[in-house]
């Protein structure tokens, strides 16, 4: 593995993040204001200001990729959506990061060209499985389109979204070169989820189970509790792991406060797949830390849940079995749960003519299962490649957890591994790996974890070489 180039020092052209925030806070505020009142602007000011924001972001990112990436962490959750067209019954929306991510990539390439830092993509354990999966996705989609199984525009749209997610990963991977940078980006990731927690905390008094009055992220329009719930579950597991692995008392208090701020609105998403994701991830955390008191606390927390959980949360969970008495529930669960199980039978009936490579991306719109949809789109070979990517990510994070000393980075690695397990559970009931508000932060964190892995592997190699030289001398 070639990691020498990856560990080169950050360019001196970087500028402090604080320089950018006043300008972009003001400009973003104006754009957001015009967004809400865009009907009255008749397009005279809104789009020119958006263009100005993009140009400013390009210039800023050219001089400071770090600042561009930090602004991206906020845009992933706080950017508005603008409908530009429709694809069949679906609205085609553009979010701020759909523009900012390509701009950031262009700024990165421009820096490389001007500073003559021509180098190939940083080598990592993820490059091969990601490349093969993406190649198969494109190939199977072309096959599906030729057979009339995959609609052209939705297929292109979903492929571009997948490439956008992966672009986030590779941007982080190719920029982050030190553990200090990982800590910086981790801080802003935690700040973002805390702000989301505060934002959604004010929605709690108005939430209602079995209605559209559910927890929603900023600019989301119709609430999508599975999206915000999956995001919160993933970050809650990282916060929990940071609390367990950090030895600094002041930071542990901050993690505890942060966890409470996020956990309360998380409960009121009323999303059962997110609950399951958090529980499975938390169990994995307790197994990996191997502390009896942690297992005891978690067991007590879960066993007493019927006593402390809000009544609406208990009602949402109880509905799983209460609805089973109604006609048509032959599996002993509610109709929503039952439909998720039936998805696999529907998927097989549809894809059995091409089980190895599937029928292409967007060949069938499974809303309730990532596994069924992935199998339908890229077949058993694609599903295997996808699981290969996941396995590599887990092995990298687990190696870091076992190797690093106590501290935030060890906690981040543990939390990421647990969060990954949680998202795999979440994927049984949601097309998790297509959900923008989950996947953008996920691939950002994946870039941090793999970058940290490359840093530590390089340090270990250098230490072994040094010891070998001393032995020879």
Image (cartoon, grey):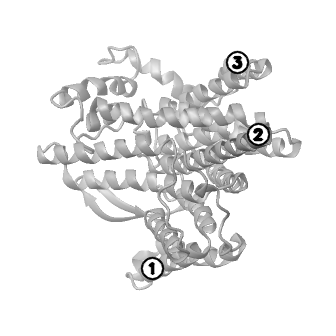
Q: Residue at x 53, y 40 (%)?
A: 230
Disc sitting over residue 299 in the figure: 3
- In this figure, which residue is indicated by the disc labeled 2? 472
- In this figure, which residue is indicated by the disc labeled 1? 51
**Which is more foreground, mark 1 or mark 2?**
2
Which one is earlier in the sequence, the residue at label 3 or at label 1?
1
- What is the CA distance from the residue labelled 3 to the residue labelled 1? 53 Å
Which one is earlier in the sequence, the residue at label 1 or at label 2?
1
**Which is more foreground, mark 3 or mark 1?**
1
Vertical comparison of 390 with 57: above or below: above
Q: Residue at x 58, y 39 (%)?
A: 234
The spot of residue 149 in percent (x, y) is 16, 42
Q: Is residue 153 visible?
A: yes
Dot 2, crowdedness within 10 Å: few (<14), some or many (≥20)?
A: few
Q: Quadrant of residue 28?
A: bottom right
Of the pair 124 and 401, the residue shown nearer to us = 124
Dot 3, crowdedness within 10 Å: few (<14), some or many (≥20)?
A: few
Of the pair 85 and 452, the residue shown nearer to us = 452
Of the pair 427 and 398, the residue shown nearer to us = 398
Quadrant location of the N terminus in the rendered image: top right
Marks 3 and 2 close (CB-CB < 8 Å): no
């Amino acid at each position: 593995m070639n990691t020498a180039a990856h560990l080169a020092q950050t360019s001196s052209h970087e500028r402090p993040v604080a320089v950018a925030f006043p300008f972009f806070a003001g400009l973003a505020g104006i754009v957001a204001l015009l967004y809400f009142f865009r009907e009255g602007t008749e397009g005279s000011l809104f789009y020119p200001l958006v263009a100005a924001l993009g140009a400013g972001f390009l210039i800023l990112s050219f001089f400071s990729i770090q600042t561009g990436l930090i602004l991206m962490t906020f845009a992933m959750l706080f950017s508005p959506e603008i409908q530009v067209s429709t694809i069949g019954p679906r609205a085609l929306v553009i979010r701020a990061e759909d523009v900012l991510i390509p701009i950031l990539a262009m700024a990165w390439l421009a820096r490389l060209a001007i500073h003559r830092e021509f180098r190939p993509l940083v080598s990592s354990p993820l490059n091969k499985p990601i490349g093969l999966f993406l190649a198969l996705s494109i190939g199977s989609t072309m096959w599906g389109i030729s057979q009339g199984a995959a609609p052209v525009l939705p297929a292109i749209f979903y492929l571009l979204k997948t490439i956008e997610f992966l672009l986030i990963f590779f941007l982080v991977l190719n920029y982050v070169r030190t553990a200090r940078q990982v800590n910086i980006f981790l801080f802003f990731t935690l700040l973002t989820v805390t702000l989301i927690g505060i934002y959604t905390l004010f929605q709690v008094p108005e939430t209602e189970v079995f209605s559209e009055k559910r927890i929603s992220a900023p600019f989301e329009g119709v609430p999508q509790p599975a999206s915000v719930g999956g995001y919160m579950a993933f970050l809650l597991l990282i916060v929990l792991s940071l609390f367990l692995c950090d030895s600094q008392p002041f930071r542990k208090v901050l993690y505890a406060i942060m966890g409470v701020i996020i956990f309360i609105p998380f409960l009121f998403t009323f999303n059962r797949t997110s609950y399951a994701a958090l529980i499975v991830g938390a169990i994995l955390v307790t197994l990996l830390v191997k502390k009896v008191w942690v297992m005891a606390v978690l067991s007590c927390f879960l066993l007493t849940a019927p006593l402390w959980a809000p009544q609406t949360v208990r009602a949402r969970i109880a509905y799983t079995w209460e609805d089973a008495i109604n006609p048509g529930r032959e599996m002993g669960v509610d109709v929503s749960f039952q439909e998720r199980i039936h998805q696999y039978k529907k998927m097989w009936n549809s894809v059995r003519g091409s089980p190895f490579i599937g029928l292409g991306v967007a060949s069938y719109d499974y809303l309730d299962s990532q596994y069924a949809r992935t199998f339908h789109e890229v077949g058993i070979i694609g599903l295997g490649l996808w699981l290969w990517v996941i396995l590599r990510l887990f092995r990298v994070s687990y190696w870091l957890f076992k190797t690093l000393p106590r501290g935030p980075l060890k906690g981040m690695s543990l939390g990421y591994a647990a969060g990954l397990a949680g998202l795999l559970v979440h994927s049984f009931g949601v097309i998790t790996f297509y959900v923008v508000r989950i996947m953008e932060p996920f691939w950002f964190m994946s870039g941090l974890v793999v970058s940290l892995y490359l840093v530590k592997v390089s340090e270990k190699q250098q230490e072994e070489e040094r010891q070998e030289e001393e032995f020879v001398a």
